[in-house]
Image (tube, coloured by chain):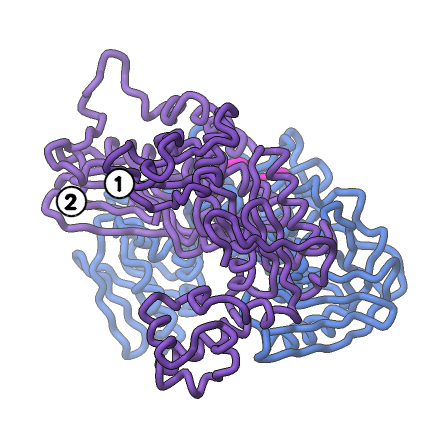
Chain colours: A blue, B purple
Amino acid sequence: MKFQSNKDVLASAIIFATKLIVGKNSNPLLSGIRIEAADNAVTLSSFDHDVSTKTTIPADVDTEGVVLVSGKMISDIVSRLPHEQVSFTLTDTKLAIVSGSAKFALATMPVADYPNLPEVPPAVGTIDGEDFAEAIAQVGIAALRDDGQPAIGNISVELSPESISFTATDKYRIASRDIAWKKNDGADSVQVLVPARVLTEVGKMFHQNDEVTISLYVGGEKEIIALSAGDKVVTSSLGKGMFPNVRRLLDDKGHGESYAIVSASELIDATRRVSLVIEKDNALRFSFDENGLQLEAVNGENAQGSEIVDIHLVGEPVVAWLKPKLVIDGLTGAHSQFVRLGFTSSSEPGKAGPVLFTAHTGRDATDVQASYRYLMQPNLLPR
Amino acid sequence: MGKQDGSGRHVTVGDVDDSGTPFLHIDMDAFFASVEELDDPSLRGTPVIVGGSAGRGVVSAANYAARAYGVNSAMPMSIALRRCPHATVRRPRFERYSQISRQVFDIFRTFTPLVQPLSIDEAFLDVSGARELFGSPQHIAQLIRDAVREQVGLTCSVGVASSMFVAKVASSRAKPDGLLVVPAPDTQTFLAGLPISALWGVGPVTAKRLANFGVLSISDVQTAGVGSLTPILGERMAQHIHNLALGIDPRAVSDDRRDKSIGHSSTFHTDLTARADCDRAVLRFATDVSARLRAHGLVAHTVVLTVRFGDWTTITRSHTMTEPTDVTKRIADEARHLLSAVSGIERGVRLLGVRVENLVGDRASDVLWDDPDEWRTMDEVVDAVAAKFGRNTVTPASLLRPRGARRASGQPEPRKPRGDSAGSSEIS
C-alpha cells in the first residue's frame, strides 16, 4: 500500500475516526484505525463494538492495500506534521509516514482479525446539519454525565412526521428541542435513545453539512442508528433502558402564567459575577419583582455578593434558589438575545416550582419560540 | 438534675417566652418498663423491672413505681429485688422496643427533619424551621407529647431551650411526663442552681478538683470566669465548662448519618472461580444492602465492591453516582458493573463484599423527577413482603437455585470452617 494525501484533509479524517473510540477499549485491535487505499481514495474506519465511523477522502494511490494501526498515535503524528503533503507506505508490517523531512515508522496490527463494521440500515429521513448541530448542543448539556445510569446518559430522539424532538435530562433539568426534518415515505414514528457522548460529538462533526441522513434499525438484536453526511458515516448502538417520560413535565399547562423576560447575556454575566463568592454547586437567590431581578450569594460569614438586572415581569414577584451553572446552561442554550423564564407555582410548602426557559424574540413581545424548552428545578428554600 | 424517682420535678405551666429556644430534647419515660406496661396493662401502677434474670442480672430499666423503692437502672438485680421484692421482672425484648422506638421517631420526624437520635428512647430536635407549619417550640413540644401519648400510648418528657445542652438538662428536670421550657434570657439563672456535675464533661474527678478550689455549683463557674478556671482544668476544659455554665453550646442538631456505610460481605466455603457465581453473589449482597438502606431511610452516593482473592490480595473498586439512590436495581447494576471490570477471577475469589457509602438522610428533593417508578414500586413490594415474612422471601430470579440443584456449583456457600468471617453485615 502506498498513497499521498493532503495533510489537513487526512488529519481531519483521522480525528473523525478516532474521536469517538480512542482510549476506551482493552482490546488493542479496537483502538486501531483501518486504512484502505483503492481507486484514488482512502477509506478510514474505526469500530469499538458500540460506535463505528467511516470516512473517505481523495488521495493519490500508487499501490492499493489495507492496514490497521493504533489510532491514538497516528492521530497525534498526522496533526503535527510539518509539510502540506504526506505519504503513507506499507512495507512488510511497518507503516512509514513521511512529510517533508519528518519520517515515522509505525507497527501495524493484523488487519484480518479486525471485525466487520455494522451495515448501515435503511434511511428514515434527512435533517439540516446546522439545525442538527444546534439542537444537539442545546440539549446535550442536560444529559447525565454518569455511566451508572444508562437511560439518562442518552439523548432521546423522537421521530414524528413533522419534526424530530431531542430531549435530555439529568433529573435537575430537562432540555428539549424540536426541529423540522424530511421524513422518508414509509418511515415509522419512533423514539430511540442515543448515547449523549456520541450524539454530541457527531453534532459537532456534521455542523457544516447541508444534509445529514438518519438511518435506523430497531426491533432486533443489534439496534443501531447511523448518521451520515458527505463521505462520513457514524453508527452507534442504541442506548438501553427506559427513558423517563419527561415531556409531560415540559407540557405542563401550569407554566407561563407568570414570567420574566431577561437579557440572556446580562443575566449570564451577572450570574457568573455573583456566584464567584459561593461554593461550587451551591445556589444563588433570585428574587424577581417590579424593581428587577436581584441575585444574591451568601457564603456564610465569609462572603456575600449581589447584583440587580433589568427584567420585564408579568405576574406576582417570585423568589427561587437556583444553581448558577443550571441557569447559565438554560440561558446559553436558548440561543436568543432575550429569554423568557416561566414560573410555576408549587403545592409543596418551601418548594418553588420548576422554571421554564424559552427563547423570546423581543422584550415586550409575547410570542414564544417553544421549539427549545429548558426546565430546571430550584433548590429547596433554605430556612 | 431530676432524681431518678421523679422527685424534684420541675415543669412549665402556661405559656412562657419560647422565642429563642428552638432546641428540644425528648426522653421517653422509663422506656423499656413503660413498653412492658403498655403490652401488659395488668402491670400498670405496680413496680416493673426490666433486666437480666434474677441473681446475676442487671437492671436495664425500672418504672417509677419501682424507682420509689430505690431501684435504679444499672443496679444489680439482686439489690433491686432486695429493695423491691414484689416487683415484676421482665426480660428485655429489644425487638419490641426498637419497633416502638421507630414509631416514636417517626412522630418526631413529622415535625422536623432535624432529629438527632441519642439512643433508642432519646433525641434532640431542632424545630426552628417548623414554626410556620406547627407553631412555637413550646407548642410543638406539647403536640409531640400528645401525639406520642395518643398514637403510641407512652409518655415522654421534653426540655425546650436555647441550646442542646440546656434542653437536655431541662428534660431531665421535667421527668416524668413533663415539659420544661427554659426561656433564653433565663438560661443562666436556670443553670445557676444546678450541681456542677450537670455540666457535660464534668465527672467525679473534675468535680472533686473543682470542689477543692471552692467551685461547687454552676453559679460558681459562672462567676469564676475562664481565667481562674484555667489553672485548675487547663485552657480547653475551662473554656468548655465555662461556656456550658453560661448555656453556650455551639453544637447543631445533625441527623448524624453522613459518612456512614452499610455493607455486606461473605467469605466463601470454596473459592469462586466462575464469573457468573461472583456476579450472583454480588447481586445478592447488593439486594441485601439496598434493603437495609431503605429500612434506614437513607440513600447512597457511592457503591464499593471488595474482592479478596485466594492469595489474600484484596482490591476495592468504587463508583460515585451523580444522584444518590436506594433502588436495588441501581445499586446492583453499579456493583455488577464494578465486578465486570475486575480481572483474574479464575484465580479464585475468597471473599466478596458490597457496601454503600456517602449516605445521606433522604432522597434529594430538588429534582424534577425521580427514579423510574417501576423499580421503586418493586422495592416497596419486596420490602413489605420481607417485613411480613422475613428476608429473602422475595429475591431476584437469578438468585434462585435450579430445581433439584441444591448445593449446585453455582451457589456460593459461606465457608464455614473459617468461622466468624463467614457472612458479615455491618453498619458503621
Near-viewer residue (A165 or A277) = A277
Q: Position of residue B199 (x, y in %)?
A: 45, 67
Circle 1 crowding by C-alpha within 10 Å: few under 14, some 14–19, many from 20: many
Give me the disc on residue B297: none
Q: Are marks 1 and 2 in contact (CB under 8 Å)?
A: no
Q: Amino acid at mark 2?
A: Phe
Q: Position of residue A258 (x, y in %)?
A: 84, 55
The reply to whether the magenta stretch includes residue A244 is yes
Q: Amino acid at mark 1?
A: Ser
Disc 2 marks which residue?
B309
Q: Secondary structure at mark 1?
A: strand
Name the residue rendered at 24%, 43% in the picture: A113
**Horizontally, is A184 left or right of B353 in the view?**
right
**Horizontally, is B133 left or right of B347 in the view?**
right
Tell me if residue A357 can be seen: yes
Residue B149 to residue B17: above or below = above
Which residues make up the magenta segment? A241-245
Name the residue rendered at 19%, 20% in the picture: B407
Name the residue rendered at 56%, 58% in the picture: B170
**Horizontally, is A324 left or right of A314 in the view?**
left
